[in-house]
Amino acid sequence: MKKLLILTLTAAALTAQADSQAWVRQTNLTNGMLYDIPLTATGGPFQAPLPVSDLGSTFELYARGTAWDTKVYLLDTKLIRAYAPEVMFQITTEDSYVRGDPASSNYVRRTRADRPFGFTVQVSGLVAGSSAKAEREVYFTCHGRNYDPLTFSGMNAPQYLISEANLGNGNTSANGLYHQLSSPRLSAGCGEQVYTFVRYAADGVPDTILAQPKVEVWPVATASVENITSNQVFIDRIPSIIVRFTNLYPDSRTFVQVYPGTQSLGTDGTKIKGTEREYGAYYNPTHTEASTNVPQNIEISMDDLSNYAAQDGIYTLEVVTETPFFGRAPERLLYVTFEVDRVISSRGQISTTELSTGP
């Protein structure tokens, strides 16, 4: 690595050496090679002729005295090391989704608000022990930004600082982390955490972002139901039932099912036609259009629940979702246990009719 160096004589030195000859001697500390670079009497910029290694090179500014002073004066010395800080930052989540190029360290991963994630960071190319901050450390920050809970957009939303640190060369890993967004509840987290690594300004170069990956955090899905309550008894046709899905994960399969008996997690019931919703490339491998990458809010009306509970008895209505989490095992969002008792209703009607037609 070669660097453009500017070594300037002090005012006193310039006065004393007004007509002198000046040069810079570069010494490569790795192999001991020397090279003298001639300068004008007033100094100026030059290109280092020898590579600057990790150990560095010394640059010594010399000037020869005037005609009556033939001494050689050492006016200044600088130690310059080659450093090019690099950062590799890998975010790991249970969702394989990635947007952008992970190799560039500027990409987006995602997770669900209630699920842990981890990261590995590798910093290299710095000069340990250097007196120059830019050579010794890079600046690290984690910022949060909350998204609009309806549009899932962070446009114009302010960032806020979560953590910051100075990092030197080395590897760091952390796992079992949960988001630190300023949401009222962990499960309601909706936004992004941005990890930024900055090279400090030096050598005429301003602060420079080396890497800035992000992890998006989406809320936990929920479901609600109208026109049916727990343990309700239907003696006639079941009315239209409305189910609302909120924050369905952008990689998910969700449906409503019915099965006889009380609730039993993991039961494979009868899926109600028209209630299944599938999002993401995993569930739509043949789709050519881009998959959604934000949660979904939808409402479904079911008018034929009576057809799925044709016999009298106890039934359970259940909303189930599958996501990349827990190995895509079914997760329950909602259940309602109800009873159908048409026989008792019919007997009651018959008995009433018989009494009203008697003598």
Image (tube, rainbow, N blue to C red):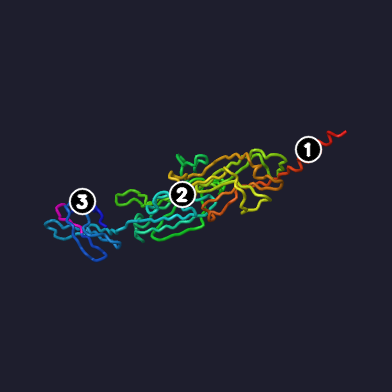
Distance of label 2 from label 1 (alpha carbons): 54 Å
The local secondary structure at tag 1 comes to: helix
Vertical side of 359 occupied by 332: above or below: below
Given residues 229 and 54, the one toward you in this image is: 229
Q: Are the residues at dot 1 and dot 3 in contact (C-beta closer than 8 Å)?
A: no
Question: Magenta residues, as a range?
Answer: 18-24
Residue 134 appears at what percent x and percent y? 35, 54
The earlier-in-sequence mark between 1 and 3 is 3
The earlier-in-sequence mark between 2 and 1 is 2
- Quadrant where the C terminus sits is top right
Given residues 37 and 231, the one toward you in this image is: 231
Between circles 2 and 1, the one closer to the viewer is 1
Q: Quadrant of residue 288?
A: top left
Q: Decide if residue 236 is on the left or right side of residue 284.
A: right
Q: Is residue 182 visible?
A: no
Q: Please, which residue is most extreme toward the right here?
A: 359
Q: Residue at x 61, y 40 (%)?
A: 302
Distance of label 2 from label 3 (alpha carbons): 63 Å
The local secondary structure at tag 2 comes to: loop
Given residues 277 and 336, the one toward you in this image is: 277
Q: Amino acid at mark 1?
A: Gln
The residue to which callout 3 is attached is 44
Given residues 321 and 54, the one toward you in this image is: 321
Q: Amino acid at mark 3?
A: Gly
Distance of label 1 from label 3 (alpha carbons): 109 Å
Q: Is residue 21 magenta?
A: yes
Q: Amino acid at mark 2?
A: Pro
